[in-house]
Image (spheres, grey):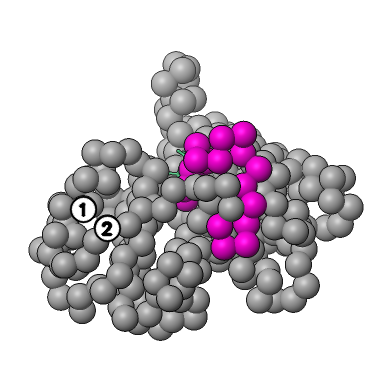
Amino acid sequence: MTFLAIDVGNTRLKWALHEAPGPGAALLAQGAEFLDHIERLAEGAWASLPTPERMLGCVVAGDAVKRRVEEQMELWDVAPQWVVASAQEAGLINGYDHPTRLGCDRWVAMIGARQRILAQGPARPLVVVMVGTAVTVEAIDAQGRFLGGLILPGHGIMLRALESGTAGLHVPTGEVCMFPTNTSDALTSGGTYAIAGAVERMVQHVIAYCGSEPACMMTGGAGWKMAPSMTRPFELVDNLIFDGLLEIAARRFA
Ligand SMILES: Nc1ncnc2c1ncn2[C@@H]1O[C@H](COP(=O)(O)OP(=O)(O)O)[C@@H](O)[C@H]1O
Ligand SMILES: CC(C)(COP(=O)(O)O)[C@@H](O)C(=O)NCCC(=O)O
Ligand SMILES: [K+]
């Protein structure tokens, strides 16, 4: 039973077609499009795919974008199903004040991360970092309770905010370095270490609250940019949202 997973963030739509709806299923094809190019999918990358028999996705880019994706899916006879964060799913308990207001991408990525940890050995606390348009930093205890998380601007948004709020900060992208000596490097390093510093703080909070070192996982389109600047070892995972969607699909479509 072929299964299509779709992750629509605020910058890009990522999709992956699997042989079956469950963890470990073989990957048949995958791709990504910037949101402006969604209309290309049905006649482009999706045109030659085997028909997906089941689909599950998460969208945080708004209802209009969701409708544009559903229009492209009319190519197939498959019902679009979108995940919404809930009080409890796939072994995770949601500690948000209003569980359904948590970004579904955050919820699904945490489900994917938790299942990965359980597959590796005994349950441990977990810090999950997702570096996309925005950056999110989540804390999960060893029992699978989502304690809470941080939201901060991603690299692009930080730079654009500084460019638009000042007269003298219109410069090309620089290098990350400890002691920047030009504006480009100062901006690039400032953004990178702002994220790394926030993550370090969350790791400290988890150690203080849970009493043990968390496992640390990082994902998202810009994860590879952050990896060398982290203060602790992080497992870089290609797309935790697909892992989470496969886990949820296994339970829903069994
Ligand atoms: N090949 C790439 N295409 C697009 N964005 C990329 C790419 N490589 C890195 N990035 C960075 O990743 C960010 C988008 O990541 P992504 O995971 O697609 O975000 P979202 O899930 O919010 O749509 C961009 O801000 C950009 O800086
Ligand atoms: C925080 C986010 C903007 C992240 O979006 P992304 O960077 O993946 O495009 C998204 O998860 C969201 O809109 N969340 C809703 C608010 C919340 O999670 O509290
Ligand atoms: K995302």
Q: Give coordinates of residue 54: x percent, y percent.
A: 30, 70
Which quadrant is home to the C terminus? Answer: bottom left
Residue at point 62%, 47% (across, down): 94
Q: Give coordinates of residue 146: x percent, y percent.
A: 67, 49
- Left or right: where 174 falls relative to 10: right
Residue at point 77%, 63% (across, down): 124
- Residue on which the image places disc 2: 80
Residue at point 36%, 57% (across, down): 57
| Amino acid at the residue labelled 1 | Glu
| Amino acid at the residue labelled 2 | Pro
Would you place residue 209 above or below residue 6 in this image? above
Q: Rate crowding at label 1 as few (under 14), some (14 to 19) or many (20 or more) other CA atoms within 10 Å.
A: some
Q: Is residue 27 visible?
A: no
- Residue on which the image places disc 1: 70
Q: Let me know if residue 171 is in the magenta part.
A: no
Residue at point 23%, 52% (across, down): 69
Which quadrant is home to the N terminus? Answer: bottom left
Q: Which mark is residue 229?
A: none
Q: Rate crowding at label 2 as few (under 14), some (14 to 19) or many (20 or more) other CA atoms within 10 Å.
A: some
Q: Secondary structure at mark 2?
A: loop
| Of marks 2 and 1, the one in the foreground | 2
Numbered range of the magenta stretch: 89-105
Would you place residue 53 above or below residue 184 in this image? below
Considering depth in this image, is 140 or 203 the residue closer to the camera?
140
Q: Let me know if residue 93 is in the magenta part.
A: yes
Q: Secondary structure at mark 1?
A: helix
Q: Give coordinates of residue 72: x percent, y percent.
A: 16, 56
